[in-house]
Amino acid sequence: MTHLHLLLTATVTPSEQNSSRKSGWETAMAKDILGEAGLHFDELNKLRVLDPEVTQQTIELKEECKDFVDKIGQFQKIVGGLIELVDQLAKEAENEKMKAIGARNLLKSIAKQREAQQQQLQALIAEKKMQLERNSISLVILI
C-alpha cells in the first residue's frame, strides 16, 4: 500500500473508515506516517498541525500569560498609587521644610533686629550718661 493511500485513509472520518472496511492497522499506520510529517488528529478527528498535547500546553500557557498580564496590570496600578502617595508626601515634606527655613530665617532676623536695637539703646544710654555728667558738672559750677 502506498503512503498516499494510507494518508487518504487516515483523513476520512471514523464512519467513512467503517464503511470502506479498512483495518485499524492501516489507520494506525496512517496516523504514524502523518505524525512523522507533523500532522495529528484531535479529539474530533480533525487533522491538526500541532500535537494535541502541544496544543493543550499552548492553551494553558496562553491562560497563564493572561493571568500574568492581569497581575502585572494590578501591580502597576498599586505601584502607581504608591508613587502618587510618595510624591504627595515628598511635596508635603518640602513645604514643611520651606516653612521651617522661613521660620529660622525670621528668628535670625528678629535676633539681629534686637541686637541692633540693643546697640542703639546702649549708645543712647552712653549719650545720656555723658549728658548727665555734663549737667552734673554744670550744676557743681553753678552752686
Image (cartoon, rainbow, N blue to C red):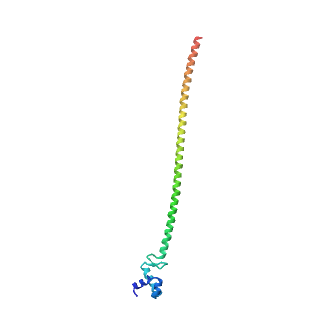
- Residue that sits furthest to the top in the current view: 143
Seen in the image, is 31 located left or right of residue 136? left
* Vertical comparison of 129 with 23: above or below: above
Q: Position of residue 32 (x, y in %)?
A: 45, 82
Tell which of 17 and 136 is nearer to you. Answer: 17
Which quarter of the rendering shows the C terminus? top right
Q: Position of residue 84 (x, y in %)?
A: 52, 52
**Residue occupying image coordinates x 55% and y 24%:** 124
* Vertical comparison of 32 with 59: above or below: below
Tell which of 100 and 81 is nearer to you. Answer: 81
- Residue that sits furthest to the right in the current view: 143
Q: Position of residue 69 (x, y in %)?
A: 50, 63
Q: Position of residue 5 (x, y in %)?
A: 40, 85
Which quarter of the rendering shows the N terminus? bottom left
* Vertical comparison of 93 with 130: above or below: below
**Residue occupying image coordinates x 50% and y 66%:** 66
**Residue occupying image coordinates x 41% and y 83%:** 8
Tell which of 91 and 123 is nearer to you. Answer: 91
Looking at the rendering, which quadrant does residue 106 occupy? Answer: top right
Tell which of 44 and 131 is nearer to you. Answer: 44
* Vertical comparison of 119 with 64: above or below: above
Seen in the image, is 65 located left or right of residue 132? left
Picture mark count: 0
Seen in the image, is 108 located left or right of residue 3? right
